[in-house]
Amino acid sequence: MLICQVLSPVVVSCVVMRVLGIESSCDETAAAVVEIDDRGVCTLLSNVVISSLDLHAKYGGVVPEIAARSHIEAIEPVVDQAVSQAFPDDDDPWDKIDAIAVTYGAGLGGSLLIGVLTARTLAIVKKKPLYGINHVEGHLYANFLSGGSPSLADEYKFPSKTPEFPVLGLIVSGGHSQLVLFEDHFKYRLLGQTNDDAIGEAFDKVAKIIGLPYPGGPNVSKKAAEGNAQAFQLPKAKMAQKYDFSFSGLKTAVLRLAQEQIGEDFTFPSTGLAERLSEQQKADIAASFQRVAVETVVDKTVLAFEEFQPKTVIIGGGVASSPALRQALAERLPVAVEYADPKLCTDNGAMIATLGCFKLWLGQPEADPYTLDIKPNLSM
C-alpha cells in the first residue's frame, strides 16, 4: 500500500493498493497484479497466462484431468513471474502486494482446487488478505481496467473511461451466457441466463459437426467469413422468461441441416458429416449459425437496454472478442460500447485481480484462508 503525504494545500493524500489475482478455472493457468488508486482507477501491472490448450485440442475439448495436472506444473512459476514482472526493481516484491484474489468458482473442480490451494497457502505464508472471486463476475471486470504500466501500455488496448453505473453486463463464454444489471459494485441482479448450452459451448459443438478444430469459437468465425450468413434460416429459441437464452435447439438445427445437405436423415452419425460436406457448405453453415447465435444475445441485450436504460453496456467472456458480436452490438445499441482487449476476454488473472481490487477498496468481507473451498457450480 502506497500512501501519498500532503505536501501542500493543493496536494491531497492518496492510497494505492495492489492485488495479485490467480485464475485456474479451466485450462489457463493465470496470474496478474492490478493496482487501484483512491479514485477507483485500475492499472494493470502484470499479466501472465500459460494455456494447456494444445494438450486438449486433439480431444476436441478440455479434459479435466489433463487441465488439473497442467495447473500443478504451471501455477508456481506463473505466480512468481506475475509478481516479479509487476515490481522488477524490488528485492522483495511481495512487500508491495496488499491482497490476493482467487477464482473459487465456477469451473472444473480439479482446476479450481489448484488455484485456491495456492492462494490460500500464499495468503497464510505472506500474511495477506484473501478474497474469493466469482469467475463469471470477474469476466465483466476486465472492462474496469483503465490502463497498464509502461511495459504493458502498448500490449493491450484499454477502454478510455471506467464504466458508469448503472451498467448492463452481457457475459458470453464457453460455460456461461448471462445478462446482468449492476446498480453499483456488488449490487446487481441476474436478468437472464442460458437454460442449456452456453453460446461458446454451442460454437464448439457446431465446429465439431462441420469438422473444424477446437476451440470452436474463433474457428467457426474464421470459416463464417468465407460463407453466406443468409444461406440458411435457422431457428431462434423462444423463452418463457424474456431474458433467458437457449442454444441447444440451434445446435440441433445445425446438425439436421448438415445431414440434409449431404442427403442423409437424422440417423446419420454426426462424426461422418465433415468428410462429406463441401468447404462452401461448411462456410455457409458456419456463417448462418454465427448470425443466429449473435442475433440471439444481441436481441436480448437491446431489449434489456431499452427497458432499464443503463449508462454503460459491457461484455465479458471469450465470445466477447468475436468481431461479429461486437459489430452487431455497435450497429444496434444507441450507446458506444468500449470493449476489453481480446486478450483480456479469455480467462486471465487480470480480471480476477481487478475484481479483487474493488473488494479490497470497498471493504468487502475477506475469505478465510484456512477454509475457503471451491464451488464448481457457482452462479451469479
Image (spheres, rainbow, N blue to C red):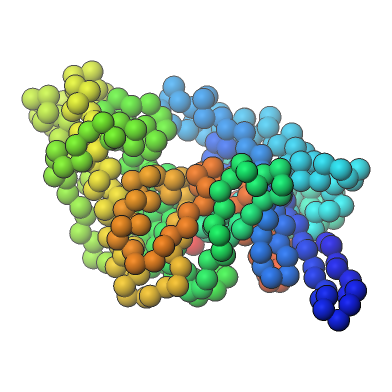
Q: In this view, does 336 lie above or below 58?
A: below
- Residue 230 % position (x, y): 16, 42
* Direction top: furthest residue: 275
- Residue 181 % position (x, y): 44, 70
Foreground residue among 80 and 9: 9
Quadrant placement of the N terminus: bottom right
Residue at 63% across, 49% down: 350
Foreground residue among 7 and 170: 7
Q: Is residue 12 visible?
A: yes
Residue at 14% across, 40% down: 232
Q: In this view, does 277 lie to the left or right of 309?
A: left
Residue at 66% across, 60% down: 42
Foreground residue among 47 and 207: 47
- Residue 370 % position (x, y): 75, 55
Q: In which quarter of the image is residue 366?
A: bottom right
Count of picture labels? 0
Foreground residue among 336 and 167: 336
Q: Can residue 104 be seen in this view?
A: no
Q: Is residue 283 left or right of residue 371?
A: left
* Direction bottom: furthest residue: 9
